Amino acid sequence: MTDALKRLSDEGVAIWLDDLSRKRITSGNLAELIDQQHVVGVTTNPSIFQKAISHGDGYEQQLTDLATRKVTVDEAIRMITTADVRDAADILRPVFDATDGQDGRVSIEVDPRLAHRTDATVAEAKQLAWLVDRPNTLIKIPATKAGLPAITEVIGKGISVNVTLIFSLERYREVMDAYLAGLEKAKAAGLDLSLIHSVASFFVSRVDTEIDKRLDTVGTDEAKALKGKAALANARLAYQAYEEVFSSDRWAALDRAHANKQRPLWASTGVKDPAYKDTLYVVDLVAPGTVNTMPEATLDATADHGEVTGNTIAGTYEQARAELDAVAKLGISYDDVVQLLEDEGVEKFEAAWIDLLNSTEAELKRLAPSEG
């Protein structure tokens, strides 16, 4: 084992685990990852909960109690998921305290079926924050068009947010603008800005998956040479945008009011193409002030053989722009790709949530006490 995870942390990358289950909590595994693998946060999504609850153990007693109370399946899901997030937040609380609230956080997502409804997203975010009732929670809101004003509204109420499903540079700038607008609302309301935190989850591997598929269709040597480059280029240019926004005059006014920067979070960092090194979206996206949320397999791979060589984003912007331009010159539309990925991302989370609802409903029926 190398000390790659420590080196990554020393370079200013916060290591978060992209997974959660009750078994991981109760077995001591999460505490062990925090203690031994430099993990300082946890992200969840509908797919993670669907897998955990449908295939994991540790939920039967709570499901039995919920079935006895005859709660709706939607209420059951919220009771189960918020319980896991609350327990994980308690395990991470020492990290939260030691980092002044920067890390030690657990994310929970609004119902993905609300992704295109602003008011419903805001209402759900408020409800989740109330249900979990831990200061080290982040409420995940998707970066859809309807999500942007919801981000401003929720931040303006002093609720910390993880903005998810960001694929495009234009949308990322809109997300940062929504965050700053939320901070300005919170400031006008007299809230303590130092207590409000946010990360912006910029998705990585899915960009390569879609663009590589289109490069294969083009089929030229020039196209093949560009495979595996677009996702890193996109993320690096996102970091450039982050640097620009958080050195602006607008930010400076909020900084004086003790606001926190919205950190870029690299999401979807598990490699989809086995031809690529399994640590690609970790070791090639090292820069201070970032978060990398990893599936456990990626975390283990990085710990085992990751080569962390320092900042791998600084000085790459010109090359990154050239690579995305080269892809565009082959007739591959960047705007089309990122819109497709956003639409698919929402659809995948919706499908996972519906699967979770259906499987939980079946369990509630199975465990319901017989009448009489």
Image: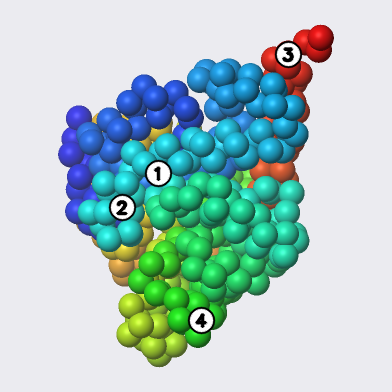
**Disc 2 on helix, strand or loop?**
helix
Left or right of 146, for residue 83: left
Tag 3 residue:
369
Residue beneath label 4, please? 189
Q: Are marks 1 and 2 in contact (CB under 8 Å)?
A: yes
Would you say 219 lies left or right of 304 here? right
Q: Label 4 to label 1, Cα distance in Å?
A: 27 Å
Q: Quadrant of residue 82?
A: top right
Q: 371 or 254: nearer the eye? A: 371
Q: Mark 3 or mark 4: name the one nearer the start of the chain.
A: 4
Helix, strand or loop at label 3? It is loop
**Which-is-in-front pick, marks 4 and 1?**
4
Image quarter in which the N terminus is found: top left
Instruction: Kindly report which numbered mark, 3 or 2, lies closer to the viewer in this rendering.
Output: 3
Q: Which residue of the protein is positioned furthest toward the front in this rendering?
A: 372
Nearer the N terminus, badge 1 or badge 2?
A: 1
Q: Could you tell me which quadrant the C terminus lies in?
A: top right
